[in-house]
Image: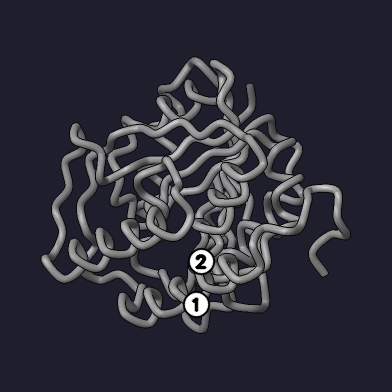
């Protein structure tokens, strides 16, 4: 299998080089699958795009893609819709999730699951994060379960893999191009009968993260209410996302 890993970035000129070096070294030692990395630059205003191009020239399995609008969901939509890999995936540039768990995501897909996600909430997981982030995350995931009776435990962990054929079906249904993209992907996958594999992870909060916790939480709640009110009336065969 060939696995494509997308790294969405916005103004990450400091963290991008060491993260790509670390990820490249990890993947080079992995023999169970082949892989490539796509750095998806979301309209950065610092030197992120120039650095991404330098990394593309330096590593043969790295590709740099510039997207002129912001939005993590937009970055994933753009890269995944163009991909020819067997499995599409993504992880956050800070590599907050220990890379040793990535092969478990791939394993989940290889044994028949359609989506594989890291979960910071499973009992076996080990997380290091602020009380504020812990409370917001747990409350949000509880809200997801309360509204949709979902079975997955962690909608927001930036560590996911999807069978490409499944991703292409779901992308046309996903409306959000920002942080809610992850939750919408999982809710739609579950609604349409795709199997979700959860992996416990080791996760350490990046204190320099670009994520605005409360702003993101508000966007996510609005997305949940939108989906709840729509009642999942759309089918996978309906007209695609505009």
> Total of numbered circles in the picture?
2
Residue 179 — which label? none
The foreground one among 129 and 233 is 233
Quarter where residue 62 is shown: top right
Residue 222 — which label? 1
Q: Residues within 10 Å of mark 1 (few under 14, many from 20)?
A: few
Say whether residue 59 is visible: no
Say whether residue 69 is visible: yes
Q: Residues within 10 Å of mark 2 (few under 14, many from 20)?
A: many
Left-right relation of 166 to 132:
right
Q: Quadrant of the N terminus?
A: top right
Question: For numbered disc 1, what is the local secondary structure?
Answer: helix
The foreground one among 102 and 197 is 197
- Residue 95: x %, y % from top left: 33, 50
Left-right relation of 187 to 104:
right
Quarter where residue 75 is shown: bottom right
Disc 2 designates what residue?
180
Q: Residue at x 68, y 44 (%)?
A: 167
Left-right relation of 52 to 103:
right
Residue 53's place in the image compared with 62, above or below, is below
- Residue 196: x %, y % from top left: 51, 34
Quarter where residue 109 is shown: top right
Q: Residue at x 78, y 48 (%)?
A: 236
Q: Residue at x 28, y 40 (%)?
A: 98
Question: For numbered disc 2, what is the local secondary structure?
Answer: loop
Q: Earlier in the sequence, mark 2 or mark 1?
A: 2
């Amino acid at each position: 299998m060939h696995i494509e890993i997308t790294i969405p970035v916005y103004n990450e000129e400091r963290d991008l080089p060491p993260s790509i070096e670390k990820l490249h070294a990890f993947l080079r030692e992995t023999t169970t699958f082949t892989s490539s990395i796509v750095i998806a630059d979301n309209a950065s205003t610092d030197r992120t795009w120039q650095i991404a191009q330098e990394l593309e020239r330096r590593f043969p399995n790295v590709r740099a893609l510039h997207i002129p609008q912001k939005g993590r969901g937009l970055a994933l939509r753009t890269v995944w819709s163009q991909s020819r890999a067997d499995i599409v995936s993504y992880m956050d540039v800070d590599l907050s999730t220990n890379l040793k768990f990535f092969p478990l995501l791939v394993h989940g897909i290889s044994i028949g699951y359609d989506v594989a996600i890291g979960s910071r909430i499973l009992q076996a997981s080990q997380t290091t994060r602020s009380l504020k982030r812990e409370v917001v995350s747990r409350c949000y995931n509880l809200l997801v379960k309360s509204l949709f009776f979902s079975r997955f435990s962690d909608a927001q962990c930036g560590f996911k893999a999807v069978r490409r054929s499944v991703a292409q079906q779901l992308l046309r249904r996903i409306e959000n191009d920002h942080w809610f993209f992850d939750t919408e992907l999982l809710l739609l996958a579950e609604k349409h009968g795709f199997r979700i594999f959860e992996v416990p992870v080791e996760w350490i909060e990046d204190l320099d993260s670009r994520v605005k916790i409360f702003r993101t939480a508000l966007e996510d709640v609005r997305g949940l209410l939108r989906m709840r009110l729509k009642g999942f009336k759309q089918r996978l065969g309906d007209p695609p996302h505009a």
